[in-house]
Image (cartoon, rainbow, N blue to C red):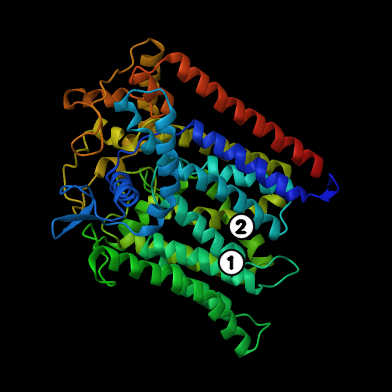
Amino acid sequence: MPHFGVSIDPNRKIKLCLFLFVISILVFISGARLVSSDEVSMYLTIESLVKSGTFAIPLENAPNSSNVDGKSYTWYEAGNILAGIPFYCAGNIAASILPLSESLKSFIPRAAVSLTGAFFGGWIAVLFFSVLRKLGVSLRVSIGMALALTLSTFLLPYFKMFMREPILALCLLGACGYLLPGPKNRNNDRALIVAGIFTGYGILTKLAFAINLLPLLVYIYRNDNKDLSGRLREVLLFLIPVFILGLGGTMMYNFLRFGNPMNIGYAGGTSFTTPVFVGLYGLLLSPGKGILWFAPMLFLLIPSHGVFRKKFPRETYLIAVLFLANLLLSSVYVAWGGDGSWGPRYLAPLLPLIFLPVSLYLDQATRTIKRIALTLALFGFIIQLGGISIYAGAYLREIGEYPYQRDIGDPEFLYKAHFIPNYSPVIGHWRMLSRNAIEHLEGNYPQFSVIGQAADNRLPIADDEKSKLLHTIDFWFTYALYANISKKIIFTVAFLLLGLCGISGFLLNRVTLKNH
């Protein structure tokens, strides 16, 4: 397509429009808040790093941290923290410009950091689209499945949180995506190095990501088109960035925190004591955490397996081994449900990979099957709408399971939310949303007195107002309403974001039709 004498790759236009469309939706539905202990712990580390140049959090009772010589350090690895730094800096700049009260300005950097997941959501959509095109999937199906992955699965609520799942999903998709061959090409040196960078950053984000390293190495080594020296060379090219970024970066991070590269400082739940069949049932089929209920399109995995295996046998085994390895590890972990969270949190990074066979299957499917897939995608989006509208912790408070009534290792920990069908978050979130939406339409919505930074750095409201949280809806514009920000400002910003959604969606449709 000529443009001022320069040939523009149509795929680049599609990727740009897809990225803008997805990220505009994710920004619009964001909560612009950090309230979970995981989020706050990593945010406080970013704040300390930018302001003071140290990983030490200047709080003795910082959430999810270890105290060493009177200094607190977050339990969490460096990947998500590093990713949040540019957003924190942008938030500080915005806070210095916006005409808000000082108490509200202090929350702008937090709101900006909370958008980190939205950025990675857009990146995942584009990368997933690229991988499908590389595998020979048609343009329309590639775009449709990229949207289905990001908007109709339990990844969606994590795109509005400052959690590690979006980065881990991107890294696993990137590692495999650059290794998977297209119909007419094999891996090249650049692809191996980029796959190694994704793998290394995944390890830098969460050490448990290293469980994926062995299956990836076996896949690279078992390249029948190479002799032994060629195989070893490819393995080395892949491993260099893994060791430098993943292992080297993690050891440097540990050294800067604790003076010991081998000290990870983690003091959370690290035992693997859950009976494996309890974990497997919980992650696959339970009403509160079963992956099939939180990503309905995965019901198509059974018929899609044969189609994908016939065309990509080696890649089928790679995806299967990666899925099983992560599933089994999560199944025996003491906190197998990743609570309190939406859906089977620890399986979220696997969703892009297990959507690949479904995508290839739908590309060759009949019109009836495609209609069934569309129905499942719409049903999935409706399920996620409950997840993004009601904060997971608020639902656990609603049913009396938070503050936690039992120890995390107790077999009956969050038993209602995990195993009792009528307490499933899939149903319960919608029940709360229906009630709260009616209250809002009647003008009976909560109003809070913002008190600046709370003592625990989580909820900036008085203790006697926290019961109102059960009647909130988890979007930035509703929180702005609760904080008594001008409705004109809220409406203007919402209108601009919706306009961006509409324009980017229109451009995506237009460029798709032009290149179909």
Residue at (23% x, 57% y) in the render: 268
- Asked if 324 appears above or below 51 in the picture, the reply is below
**The quadrant where residue 70 appears:** bottom left
In the rendered structure, the answer to whether residue 117 lies left or right of residue 508 reads left
User: Residue 4: percent from the left, percent from the top?
Assistant: 84, 44
Badge 2: residue crowd in 10 Å (few <14, some 14–19, many ≥20): many
Q: Give the spatial CA distance, label 2 vs label 1.
A: 8 Å
Residue at (73% x, 58% y) in the render: 136
Q: Given contact means CB atoms under 8 Å apart, are the residues at marks 2 and 1 in contact?
A: yes
Identified by mark 1, the residue type is: Thr
User: Residue 79: percent from the left, percent from the top?
Assistant: 40, 57
Circle 1 residue: 316
In the picture, which quadrant includes the C terminus? top right
On the question of residue 365 being in view, the answer is no
Callout 1 secondary element:
helix
Towards the viewer: 65 or 402? 65
Looking at the image, tell me whether mark 2 or mark 1 is earlier in sequence order: 1
Towards the viewer: 238 or 269? 238
In the rendered structure, the answer to whether residue 401 lies left or right of residue 246 reads left
- Asked if 259 appears above or below 129 in the picture, the reply is below
Circle 2 residue: 357
Identified by mark 2, the residue type is: Pro
Q: Residue furthest left?
A: 70
Q: Residue furthest bottom?
A: 228
Q: Which mark is residue 333?
A: none
User: Residue 501: percent from the left, percent from the top?
Assistant: 60, 31
Callout 2 secondary element:
helix
**The quadrant where residue 190 appears:** bottom right
User: Residue 140: percent from the left, percent from the top?
Assistant: 72, 45
Towards the viewer: 82 or 221? 82
Residue at (46% x, 62% y) in the render: 201
